[in-house]
Image (spheres, rainbow, N blue to C red):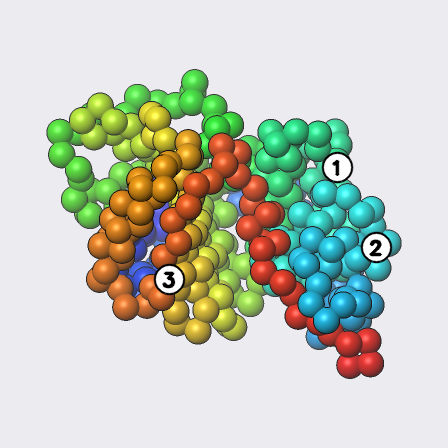
Amino acid sequence: MPGTKIPIGLINSGVTAKLSELVKPGFTGQSKTPKGILSSPALQNLPPQDTRDSPVKIIAEAAREPVLPAREFFMQTAAALRQPKDPLSTALLAFVRFFSLSPTLLGYLRRETLASLKSASPGSPKETAVLESRALAASAALDKGLSLSPAILEHYARYFVPPALWDKSSQQEIPDRVEAPSAEELEALIEEQTSAEDFLDFLNYLPGKNGQKWLVFPFCIKVKDTELRVFLRVLKKEYGEGENLIADISGPKRQWRCFIRGRAGKFRADIRVYPELSVRSLKILSKKAEIFFSGSEEIEEILVQNGEEIPSWVEDLYNEPLPFIDKEV
């Protein structure tokens, strides 16, 4: 079954045009909901998404400092919404902001996430990663107007866990290539592997809030006995600013997480590597990244740094301070 087309040129130059290509019309995949995959009755009882008034009032009540760190901001916002001030609430608010959803949906998202989890307060990095993956999957589905059954939510969430937690036991055998594939061959490979799961093909097809697209493309490739497993995720916003590409890449000895964030037509690349490299090796990798992105004038900054074996989605969304909104405003 044909799936959403992926321009392989995305990985070398011309970022803006290539992100746009990822969500171009003309999808020819499955047009109806896969049987037994999705459930949506709960969505009928959701509170209205008032993105113009109610969330602003809630945020204004929560923000009390001229510049408030994001983690504290989300804690106060959760309290203003009469929700627990725990890791699940703050993670969900980070994803609500990422997808431009209303904070008033926090209670619903908590129930969806906890349907497949035992605790909202993880005790280890592994448990934190599992909680964040479930919260991200529930938020991404709601952005598309869907409620997933617990079993399918758990299945969808596996695309968001860090490489260290991937289950490779069920991975199919990938043919070994003598040379790196051409752009056309890699595009066909990604399309074939992504469309093999009807539900993922279906979710990639559905638009999100305000016409934005959240797309997930998992694929594996093996060249000269070196196997790489890649999870590529793209958030493309049709209205308003902001584009994001996140790629987790796992090899035999090393793993990478790459963020490309766009705003006002300019992009920033943030590359994390694990296990840690020496300062000299990081500088060499930084130079290689500069050469790799040299064809794109839209990349304004490239940051290469050591990362963590189990990186956090939410910590990256916490990094930037949030603007203060005065109560009187």
Give, as a three-letter code, the residue at label 1.
Ala
- Is mark 3 in CB contact (under 8 Å) with mark 2? no
Image x and y of residue 123, in percent:
71, 29
**What's the residue at 33%, 25% (across, down)?**
252
The image quadrant where one finds the N terminus is top left
Question: Dot 3: within a 10 Å radius of its alpha carbon, few (fewer than 14), some, or many (20 or more) residues?
Answer: few
> What residue is at 58 percent from the left and 60 percent from the top?
320
User: Callout 1 environment at 10 Å: few (<14), some (14 to 19), or many (20+)?
Assistant: some
Q: Nearer the viewer, residue 312 or 17?
A: 312
The picture places residue 284, in percent across and down from the top left corner, at 27, 45
- The circle on residue 79 is 2
- What residue is drawn where x is 53% and y is 39%? 311
Disc 1 on helix, strand or loop?
Answer: loop
Above or below residue 1? Residue 164 is above
In the image, residue 291 lies at what x, y percent?
Answer: 22, 54
Q: Secondary structure at mark 3?
A: strand
Residue type pointed to by label 3? Glu
Look at mark 1 in the image and give the residue it sits on.
120
- Left or right placement of residue 149 versus residue 234 in this view: right
Q: Amino acid at mark 2?
A: Ala
Tell which circle, 3 or 1, labels the residue nearer the N-terminal end.
Answer: 1
> Quick one: label 1 or label 2, which is nearer the N terminus?
2
